[in-house]
Amino acid sequence: MLLRLPTSVSETQECLAEGAVPIGGATLVWATWQRDGFPDLAVSLREVPEANVLGRESVGAAVVLHRIDDRVPDVLRLAAATVGTGAVRRTATVGGNIVGSTLRCLLPAALVLDARATVLEPDGVRETDLGELVTKHPLLLSLHWRTPIASAYRKLPGEAGGPPPLVVASARYAEDAGDRLRVAVRDGYDVLSGTITCAPDPEETLHALRTTALGDLPIPAWDAVRAQVTGLLSCPVTD
């Protein structure tokens, strides 16, 4: 297998046109290739500046998870910090976690940030939403979002050998018509989300949230949502 390390988006585009297969820090990719056979040509984004951005409102696909710090909203920082072990976080990348992994620990955080994805295809760079990103798997360059006024993330303890642990993520945004609340939950391998306008009473807000896709959550998952949302609505603004 020949691995290309382009240093620009245009060079990466040329690699894709030649049929290069993207590779990142995800060990799952290597496991699959060891089973099914390695491609003749692969490409990594680790030297591409656009894929290594890290700021208050953007993160590159090639950024390894242990680099994610308090420059980004709490919900994304905490999500990255709970992925695997320290050794895993030093090799796993944002793009590998969201696009290449079945667990997608960062996806609930990206959803509540209402993140948009900048992707690269053989015919150029374009922007898309997270839905297309996780279903069609274009080559992710970076994610970008608008900073919330507060956010939260929690991964509950899981059982060894059991289903993926429950994840709850939330973010609150200031809007002219009233604060908006976004909540996403990973329940098993499914990720559900809901967006509502905050009511003056937290119970009214939770009732409105029940009318979204989150209303079908089992009771233990809903209890975790209730606890997080109640805390987020009452906590001082930090993001």
Image: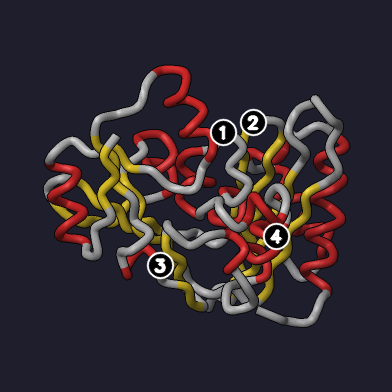
Q: Contact (CB < 8 A) between labels 3 and 4? A: no
Q: Contact (CB < 8 A) between labels 3 and 1? A: no
Query: Mark 4 — residue?
Result: 81
Quadrant in which the C terminus appears: bottom right
- Up the image or down, 153 lies above or below 234; here it is above
- Up the image or down, 168 lies above or below 238; here it is above
Query: Mark 3 — residue?
Result: 52
How busy is the neighbourhood of tag 3: few (under 14 within 10 Å), some, or many (20 plus)? many
Q: Which mark is residue 102?
A: 1
Quadrant in which the N terminus appears: top left
Q: If you read the primary sequence from the N terminus, does the residue marked by circle 3 or circle 1 appear first?
A: 3
- Up the image or down, 74 lies above or below 140; here it is below
User: Disc 3 to disc 1, how far (Cα)?
Assistant: 23 Å
Q: Give the residue at x 44% y 39%.
A: 134
The quarter of the picture where residue 170 lies is: bottom right
User: Disc 1 to disc 4, how far (Cα)?
Assistant: 18 Å
Mark whose residue sits in front, 3 or 1: 3
Secondary structure of the residue carrying numbered label 3: loop
User: Disc 3 to disc 4, how far (Cα)?
Assistant: 18 Å
Tell me which amino acid carries mark 2: Tyr
Mark whose residue sits in front, 2 or 1: 1
Q: Give the residue at x 56% y 53%.
A: 91
User: Disc 2 to disc 1, how far (Cα)?
Assistant: 7 Å
Secondary structure of the residue carrying numbered label 2: loop
Q: Give the residue at x 35% y 35%.
A: 136
Q: If you read the primary sequence from the N terminus, does the residue marked by circle 1 or circle 4 appear first?
A: 4
* Colour scheme of the rendered structure: secondary structure
Q: Which mark is residue 189?
A: 2
Q: If you read the primary sequence from the N terminus, does the residue marked by circle 3 or circle 4 appear first?
A: 3
Tell me which amino acid carries mark 3: Asn
Q: Is residue 197 visible?
A: no
Q: Contact (CB < 8 A) between labels 2 and 4? A: no
